[in-house]
Amino acid sequence: MAPLFVFSFESQIWVNSFKAFIAFCFISSSVYLINDCIDIKSDRKHPIKKYRIIASGQVSKKSAIKISIILLIISLSIGFLLNKEVGSIITLYYFIQILYCFYLKHIPLIEFFCVASGFIMRSIAGGLSSNITISPWFLLSIGMLSLFLAVEKRKAELLNLKNKEISNRKVLKNYSLKLISKFESVLSTCTVMTYSLWAYGPIIGGAKSSLMLLTIPLVILGVFRYQMLSETNTKKNSYQLSINILETPERVILNDKPTQIIVFSWLLITTYIGFVS
């Protein structure tokens, strides 16, 4: 997505950015496999996670580790073939996420920043793959949004725990809904502010066009919609358990039509601004 945010539509830039995207898909999958191997015992006690392929026994730990290593090698190969900077970012991402899997995910607050760092490194790698300069305001926006989403995920887990669903995340003992709501308020404000500064345009080192200010209402609407879902949206999943949809954020994009409309509208307007500016 990095080329879109700098309004670049050169084919080679998009190809390189896509390669970086694929590399991060592989490295993320590699980390997820390791994490699921680590959490296999607790996942088997969870009403939802027990159906994951490793926890359910569909894939053995030994096979998962082998696949993880293969994905790691492929990802690093793609990264270093693009350039050494991208390869280095992928390597750094891997070490941080592995440290997160074994230790950092159990440390309150630090876990949020580990999650956010991963999205920031993805954005940086997208720029480095095509020699695109990414605005610091944009990186801050990504960081704030990532922290916001991580906090909302914990809020959903706390709500599910309150509704007597089983949780296997020990770090939740350090949070309360009241505390998470305070984090939510700060981060939603920071997300809108940093995005607005980026959207203001090139005069302050932001977007290539100040027309991006037109998209601010959509960002605010998206934040509001996400917060609304965290408060009200519980649904029966395929295993007949009532869960808050934000515990698995990818389901928001796949299942929530208002969110889909907001994201599509944002992409449409941004693409149009890129062509006319």
Image: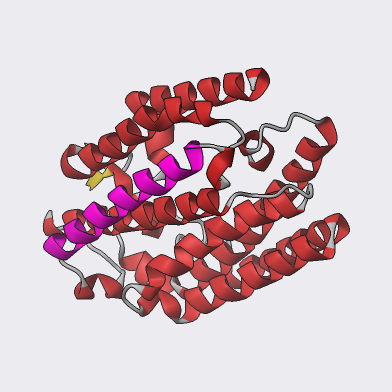
Q: Nearer the viewer, residue 191 or 178?
A: 191
Residue depicted at 43% across the width and 78% down the height = 104
266 is higher (above) or lower (below) than 22:
above
Does the magenta segment cover residue 191? yes
Residue depicted at 46% across the width and 63% down the height = 115
Magenta region: 177-200
Overall secondary structure of the magenta section: helix
The count of marks equals 0
Does the magenta segment cover residue 69? no
Q: Is 66 situated left or right of 112 in this image?
A: right
Q: Is 112 situated left or right of 4 in this image?
A: left
Residue depicted at 40% across the width and 26% down the height = 262
Residue closest to the far right: 81
Task: Determine the image quadrant of residue 202.
Answer: top right
Q: Is residue 241 visible?
A: no
Q: How is the image coloured?
A: secondary structure
Q: Nearer the viewer, residue 56 or 15?
A: 15
231 is higher (above) or lower (below) than 277:
below
Name the quarter where the N terminus is drawn.
top right
Q: Is 133 situated left or right of 153 in this image?
A: right
Task: Determine the image quadrant of residue 120.
Answer: bottom right
Percent x, y of residue 21: 68, 47
Percent x, y of residue 209: 58, 30
Task: Determine the image quadrant of residue 97.
Answer: bottom right
Name the quarter where the C terminus is drawn.
top right
Residue depicted at 36% across the width and 46% down the height = 193
